[in-house]
Image (cartoon, rainbow, N blue to C red):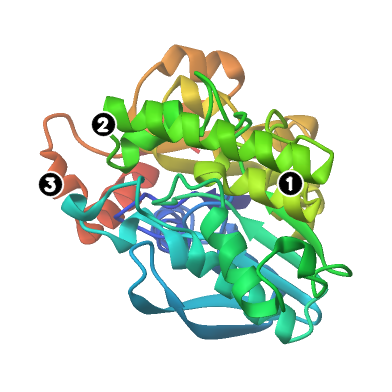
Amino acid sequence: MKIIVAIDSFKGCLTSAEANQAASEGVYAKMPDAQVVQVPVSDGGEGFLEAFHAVMGGKIVEVNVKDPLMRTIVASYLIQGDTAVIEIAKASGLTLLSPEERNPMVATSYGTGQLVVDAVRRGCKHIIVGLGGSATSDCGIGMLRAIIDAFAKGNSWDDVRELDDVSFTIATDVTNPLCGEQGAAHVFAPQKGASPDMVFALDARAKRFAEASAKHLGRDCQNMPGAGAAGGLGYAFLQYMNADCCSGIDLLLDTIHFDDLLQDADLVITGEGSADRQTLMGKLPFGILQRAQRHHVPVMLIAGRIADEQLLLDAGFSRVTSINPPGLPLKIALQPATAKENIRNTILELTI
């Protein structure tokens, strides 16, 4: 049998590559003669850089940048030829802050701008940006400021010419607009430490910035799909850099020619940390399911937590299984060694 293993990272626990390896060990223990193809995957968030590095090769570049609280850190991105791949969480991510430090009223995307600047200075003409896992809700203002600080002779975006021949592609599974009840502040800022009062203040701030930007540039991208991604960083790329927006998982699957891999496959094993009805709203396992269904290849879904199981089965997954035994405390389940063992055991126990 040819089995493709393409599991998303278990956030705060396992990378995609680690989860894939554990599942593959389970397959080999059960079926020593199986052909297992491991595909590191990400939809734009955690693991995006590593997934593209595994696919594209290239050079990992490390840069001194500012974190969301303007402290100096080292962040990495990928260069292959004249293409750069940036995962914004490396410079502006929520995991860079302790829970008590999280405050989207002050967190800035300045460090992401510094990564863009470095890539442009190294001659990159196409920049792919994975939007996910941000600590910020600043509409990308910090990022724009970093670019202005580096390139503008004056103090205005109008003075920035270095990006004129650079194309941007933003990758995200978020289709939210910038403002309003479905916008960046209302939907995502509470996860980043925002109180209800902060949410309304952030949304009002975003609205003012979008209105001023539309008046100045003569176009308005605040309602485009993806504008609300990464605390409005999506909006800044769309509005100020004319970025193309695409599904992160589709971009990756196209890059690795996933449809070709499916041609003679017998099974796909995918998964994520928590699977529920939101999985069917463009998240990575659903993107993989849609590709596999076109080739009539069954897809097995594993996760640390399962809800809405029947909905997931009705969507087309052949099996939906939690890797964790009932009653296992969350603190133990999130230990990497435990998660790897539970993935291996789950695959061993499944009927393939």
Q: CA distance from mark 1 to mark 3?
A: 40 Å
Q: Amino acid at mark 1?
A: Leu
Q: Residue at x 32, y 58 (%)?
A: 95
- Front-lying residue, 50 or 216: 216
Say above or below: 101 vs 296. Answer: below
As drawn, is 217 to the left or to the right of 351?
A: right
- Front-lying residue, 142 or 125: 142
Say above or below: 343 vs 206. Answer: below
Q: Residue at x 30, y 54 (%)?
A: 12
**Residue that carries the numbered disc 1 in the rendered image:** 238
Rate crowding at label 1 as few (under 14), some (14 to 19) or many (20 or more) other CA atoms within 10 Å: many
Precedes in sequence: disc 2 or disc 3: 2
Q: Residue at x 72, y 62 (%)?
A: 157
Q: Position of residue 136 (x, y in %)?
A: 43, 50
**Residue that carries the numbered disc 3 in the rendered image:** 331
Q: Amino acid at mark 2?
A: Ser
- Front-lying residue, 154 or 65: 154
Precedes in sequence: disc 2 or disc 1: 2
Q: Amino acid at mark 3?
A: Lys
User: Can the viewer see residue 269 in this picture?
Assistant: no
Precedes in sequence: disc 1 or disc 3: 1
Say above or below: 317 vs 124. Answer: above
**Residue that carries the numbered disc 2 in the rendered image:** 195
Q: Position of residue 56 (x, y in %)?
A: 71, 73
Say above or below: 182 vs 184. Answer: above
Q: Are marks 1 and 3 in contact (CB under 8 Å)?
A: no
Residue 9 badge = none
Q: CA distance from mark 2 to mark 1?
A: 28 Å
Q: Position of residue 183 (x, y in %)?
A: 53, 27
Q: Are marks 2 and 3 in contact (CB under 8 Å)?
A: no
| Element type at mark 2 | loop
Rate crowding at label 2 as few (under 14), some (14 to 19) or many (20 or more) other CA atoms within 10 Å: some
